[in-house]
Each structure stands twice: as C-alpha cells, then as structure tokens.
Amino acid sequence: MEKELPMEAYFLGPKAEQGKTLSEIINYILQDYLHWRRNYFPEDQQILDRAQRRRHEPWFDILSNNLDVILSRLKADFPFYSPRYMAHMLSENVMPGIVGYFAGMLYNPNNVTPEAAPITVKLELEVGKMIASMIGYDANRSWSHITSGGTVANLEALWAARQNQLNGLAFGHVAKKYGIDVQIPMANGQPANIVGLSREELIGLKPDVLVRLPEMIGNAIKSQEIDCSVHQLMSEAKYGDFSITKHGLNYVYDSLGIEPKILVSEAAHYSIRKIINLLGLGEKNVICVPTTNQFRMDIRAVKKILTDLKGDQVITALIGITGTTETGAVDPLHEILEVKREYESERNRSFWLHVDAAWGGYMKTMDTDNTQVLSDEVKRSIGAIHHADSVTIDPHKLGYIPYPAGIISFKDKFSALHSHQTAPYITLDSEIPNPLDISDLDNSMGPYIVEGSKPGASAAATWLTHRSIPLSPEGHGMIISQTIENARLFYDEIMEINRENIQDEGHPLILEPVNTPDTNVVCFFFKIKGTSRLDQHNHLNSEIYKSYTLQDGAPFAHMPYTQNYFISHTQFFPSQYPYSSVESILAKIQTTVEDYDRNGLFVLRSVIMNPWIRPAREKGFDYLQDALNNIQSTALKVYAKMELDIDAVMK
C-alpha cells in the first residue's frame, strides 16, 4: 500500500488542489467535536437559549469584522506553500499535520500531565518511540518527548550532560561512605570498583555508565544488604557536596577546580550560546571548532583541542550537527565517534555526545544504502547518529508539521532522572516516591522536562502524520529524497551558469556556489569580474536579496503577489568564521584577509524543501531553472545600477 500512495497526496497543493478534501476533513472533525459536546450528559439543560443567542449577534459582527482584518493581513504573509518560495526552512505542511493539529486544538489538552491530557500525552510518548526507532535507538530503553522546538530540545540535552557528568563523583562518594561494592567499566573499558577510582576517572566515565549509576547503586544496596534505604542514598547523592542542583555551578566547579567545556562547530545555531548562558556555563567555556571548506566540523581541529586540554579542563559535551542552519552541512559524526573512542582509550576520559539534527534528522527515513543523492561522507554520518547520547529533531522543519514541534530523544531514559521534580497535585502516589522508579516516564513527562504547559495539539499532529506517512523510505523518506535531489539539481544549474559566465567574456558577473550541499540548503553569490573588493560584492548581493523578500515598512507596502521568487541570505563574519574556514570561497574573489575582516561576506541562500518542485518539473515547468534565470537577470540590473551610481559619483 505504501508504494502505491503518491507523495502528492500528503499535501494540500500550491493551488489548494485538494482543498475540497481538506474542507471535508476539517468539517468532519468539527462536527464530530460538536457532537461530543452535545452528548456529554445530554440531559443537562442548555444554558444559552435562542433569545440569548440572538442578542449575541452584534458581538459576532465585531468578531467577524476583526477576523476579516486578520485574514486580510495574512494575505501579506510569505507563500510558504509555493515552489516559488525558496528562502527559509518553511514549506507546505502535510495534511495529516494540519488536521491532527486542528482536532487536538479543539480539545485543547495540556500535555504537562495525563490529568490534563489523558489521550495526547500517550500520543506524544508514542511519537517519542517512533522517533527513537527512526534514529536507531532501542525504543523501550530510550526516552523522547515533544518540545516547542530545537532550542528547548538542545537545552534539555545539555542540561542532562551537565547534571549527569558529576554522577560518578556523587555516587562514588556514597558508595565509599556506606561500603557499597559496585563494579563499573571505566572510560577505557577496563573494569574497576567505583570506590577506587580517582576524581578524574569518575568525572570521565562514559555517559551510558554515568546515567545508570543510580540503578547500579540501587541494585547493589539490595543484593549486599546495605543498612541504608535507596531513598536516603539517592538523596545524599543528588543533594551532596557534588550537587549542582543544591549548591549551584560556581560552588561545585570551584571546589573541584575544574572548567567545563562544550565543543561545537563554529557553524552552530545561535541557540547554543543562549543555552550556555541559561545553564550558567559561560560563553568562555564554549570551544568553537573550526570548519572545513564544506562547513563541516574539522576533525583535525577536534583532535588538537582534545590534545591541548589542560588538566583542569573537562569536556562536558561535544555537539555534532546534522544539517547546519546556514548551509545545511553535516558534521562527520562517524569520525567524531572514532576520535571519542580514541580519547576514551588513551586518556581514560569520555564525554556526552549530542547531535543537533533539528534540520537533518529526518534523513534517517531515507534508504541511505541505495540512495544516490547523498555523498558517502553524509551517508556514514547519518549511519552513526544512533551512537549519540541525545538527538534533537524538529518535526516542524523537515517533518512538515505545523509549529510548534521539536523533539529531544535520549538514548537512555535514565538520562532524565536528574531533572525529576515532585508535583503532588499531578504526579505523586505517595509522600516519598521511589527515586529509581522511572515507570512514570512511560505515562507522563511534566516532572522531567523544562516546559510546563504544552499543547497536546502538537502531539496529535505529529502522531497522525507519522502514522499516516510512515517513517520509512517508501513514506516520509520519499519527501526528503526528492528535496535533496532538487537541491543537487539547483546546485548543478548554478555550476552550469558559472561555466557560462566564465566563458562569456562580455558578462560582468560570475555566479558562484559557496559549497557542495550536504542536504537541501544551497548558498551562492555573484562575483563581479575585475574587482576583489568585498564591499562591492556584498552590496551587489545585498541588493539582489532585497528583490526577493518582503521589505520592512508600512503594512501592505510590499505584497507577495509581485514577487516571482523568495530567497534568503546569510553573512560570514570573522567573529564566527575565521579566514581559514572561508578561504576557498574568498579565493574566488581574490580578496585579502584584511578586506574580509572589515566587511565579512554576504551570500544568498535557498532552502529547497518544497515538495512540488519535482511534480511541476514533470509537468513541464522547472522552477529551479526559472528561479536562477530570474535571479541572474535581477543581478545584471542591480549591477547596471551600481555602474551608473559610480559614474555619477565620478562626474
């Protein structure tokens, strides 16, 4: 059945071709909901009689008029559904996501607890298992839940990394105090008694050992008949001398004399710095790893950073990225894992590995063994994601599901134990709960997560989407494969124009790609022949960009109906990307380090995720080729104006 269902059936259509079907489904949901309300205690008397309802008509006129205002204003929004929109990480939503959200929204459940959302909490946890299985985790051992987006998902991952890193010290202390014999593997794989390990060895334990220490200690108490309750021991570990929860960062890190470090590529999303601030780790403790000319994390740089670490510096987490926001680049996770294993073997230290796959996580639905649209390097990286301790994925990006819907997935559900809070009015069955009983992770999430109130509608939308469009190569993988194929075709068109521009001596511009796309984000810029001045190149590309977006200003000053296409832009600055990271790009302009330091580099950017590009091409219209022809025509007009302005100044 999956193979017979055309991908186009999943979406409304750029001209609302399936509008009748969507209208029927929406009306079906609404009527079903109204029926539910009418039939709850049908013997209850109606509160609003007909006479009262007639008196409400003037107010409904006000509501209708204000609704018309909103609907009119929304017409000035970007047409994300159109294949002409190639700007940001936004596109057509799948119909299951739309109708699922609408259905959930009517019931308005709050997924903080089953007491406020008995159905959609279960749906959310089922979604978590779907995503965990897609990643390659053991769905029963792992734990995943929906967040408002990638920022909160990354926050929870780094929060877990920070808190669990000191589990070795905390539980080593209580094991020594109570004479508990616990054999554990060190980071280098050698077995040891936790009591005999040094401070450095305890901090450097592998995350999969650190998160399970509470369980190991709890089992040892039972088997060794230790005169101490599990609750007492867990409380001492959680709130003892090594407890960030109790004492705060400064006290604990200063008393230990250590500096926590977070490694992430210089191409990381800006949310990482926000998270570091929120967690109190300090931006000075973020080590930005240089990137290659493909904007992937430079493995040689990672090795050097690890080698050069001082004795008091410890890696709390390394963040790999599967699809950077600016260029869609995929860090080589398989190589990062190899470096991590070498570090564990040689230095007897480990660290938390988090993968920010907010953008590219759904590539796991592709048949990576047989696809031709991904490079071998990217295939190997995607194949290594399941080794990470945690993964962020955004259904509201390449899941094509309405906002808000991010997901954090932990390889081991014990990773969440550190964050548990008691809330007697929604979670407790007893005054003193068993601290090792995480069975409620299979029934709720509120006590373990950052957010409190959260929309059950997001869970309904994501569940219905992934049940209706399977997370498989024949289902969702078809969408992802086609978008990446389209991005490669877009890149190939850029290269064809590039060759034509170079050969045409009378053409004043050359269209240049920034890099070969790993995913479906393509960056490019126009180079002016005969000049190496970055301010001129930047001005040209900046003016081109202004022709392909809705300008700020008075409402309705610039409506989308006059826009042929939409693209976005980004800028490379020395503060984020040192000259060495963009040297191969700047070499095309033959500019200098000093010029880059002064001006940075402005480039154009297209996210090729619209599902209608290929069907349109099969019908005879190539949006990709037409967009580039249109952009090049605009570039020539902008350049001609620049020449006129220069001539006017010279005169």
Image: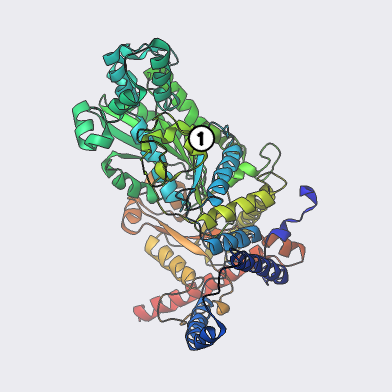
Q: From the viewer's perspective, tell me whether residue 341 is left or right of residue 122.
A: left
In depth, the one of 182 and 619 nearer the eye is 182
Out of 233 and 540, give the one closest to the viewer.
233
Residue positioned 70% across, 69% down in the render: 24
Are there few (<14), some (14-19), or many (20+) residues within 10 Å of tag 1?
many
Q: Is 297 placed left or right of 82 in the picture? A: left
* Tag 1: amino acid: Leu
User: Which residue does the image show at 38% across and 50% down from the upper left?
Assistant: 271
- Inspect this view and state whether residue 481 appears: no
Residue placed most toward the observer, 568 or 609: 609
Question: In the figure, residue 369 lies in which quadrant?
Answer: top right
Viewer-nearest residue: 561 or 522: 561
Residue 261 visible at all = yes
- Vertical arrangement, residue 27 with respect to residue 124, above or below: below
Image vertical order of residue 203 relative to residue 635, above or below: above
Q: Position of residue 50 (x, y in %)?
A: 56, 84
Q: Quadrant of residue 483?
A: bottom right
- Return the x and y of residue 66 as percentages of the image width and height: 47, 82
Residue tagged 1? 333
Total marks in image = 1
Q: Is residue 177 above or below residue 102?
A: above
Residue 523 point in image, percent of width and height: 52, 56
Going 45% across and 68% down the picture, which residue do you hit?
Answer: 540
- Secondary element under disc 1, as helix, strand or loop, is helix
* Colour theme: rainbow
Question: How far across and how far down the image is residue 448, in percent?
Answer: 41, 41
Image quarter of the C terminus: bottom left
Image position of 552 (left or right of 311): right
